[in-house]
Image: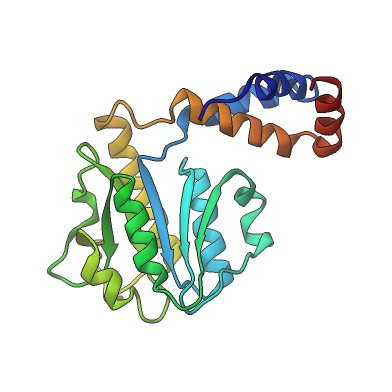
Amino acid sequence: MSLSRQEILLVDYFAQYISDHKKQLLEKVLNERTRHVTVVLEDIFQSQNASAAVRTCECMGIQDIHIIENTTKYEVNKYVLKGSYKWENLIRYHKRGVNNTEVCFRHLKENGYRIYATDPAEANKSIHDIDVQHSKVALVFGNELHGLSEYALAHADEKVKIPMYGFTESLNISASVAIGLSNLIAKLKHEQENYGLSVTEKDELRLAWYRKMVKRSQIIEKEFLRANP
């Protein structure tokens, strides 16, 4: 849904409170943002790992992060995040009495994503061979001890591994996210022209981010709406 006339005016009103440098940076970031690739975190129990993964996603231009909480509540480590979560859409699945992984996967497939479960089994194909041209990509990571759930492994479209060449069999979650996204985003920019956000999506995010950048934005917005009904 596009912004209403009132919201468009509000964007212009907020803009006067933001420096030109910050507005230019915001536009640069908006132009690099993508929903063509998304990350799913299933039951990550160490807050520093989950927060580091979120920070990595923001650095790599990922807008949406799906957080599944069947057995473990997502906890924020603000020291690790360094404010990065403010610019992300954290979509959380934490209803009691349901398989939240199933709910998440259904939502992703309804929105055109092909789901890739990360798993170190030797038979799985390399994460570097994921196709970014013909469908959107959802990359799923499991928890630190047990990896992904049986449901996630059974219902993903494909299973992929990060190739490793040493004695150690697995990587830290945040390192795995960083390696996976670094490869996928590079391929995306090289192979897929339309990986960015739509004009409407950019307009919505611009307003949301202006609200976060402007001090006392709630009060300023109320005063603006009162004067511009």
Query: Would residue 88 be found to the left or right of residue 145 on screen?
Result: right
Q: Nearer the viewer, residue 197 or 107?
A: 107
Kindly indicate the quadrant of the structure image that contains residue 135: top left
Where, by quadrant of the figure, is residue 148 drawn? bottom left
x then y, percent, for residue 90? 54, 54
- The picture places residue 62, in percent across and down from the top left corner, at 45, 44
Q: Is residue 123 above or below residue 66?
A: below
Q: Is residue 61 left or right of residue 82?
A: left
Residue 162 location, x and y as percent? Answer: 27, 61
**Residue nearest the viewer, comparing 222 with 15:** 222
* Residue occupying image coordinates x 23% and y 50%: 128
Q: Residue at x 42, y 37 (%)?
A: 34
* Residue 19 appears in the figure: yes
Q: Splitting the image into 4 quarters, where does residue 27 fall? A: top right
* Residue 215 visible: no
Q: How many marks?
A: 0
Q: Answer above or below: position of 206 versus 93.
A: above
Q: Position of residue 29 (x, y in %)?
A: 54, 31
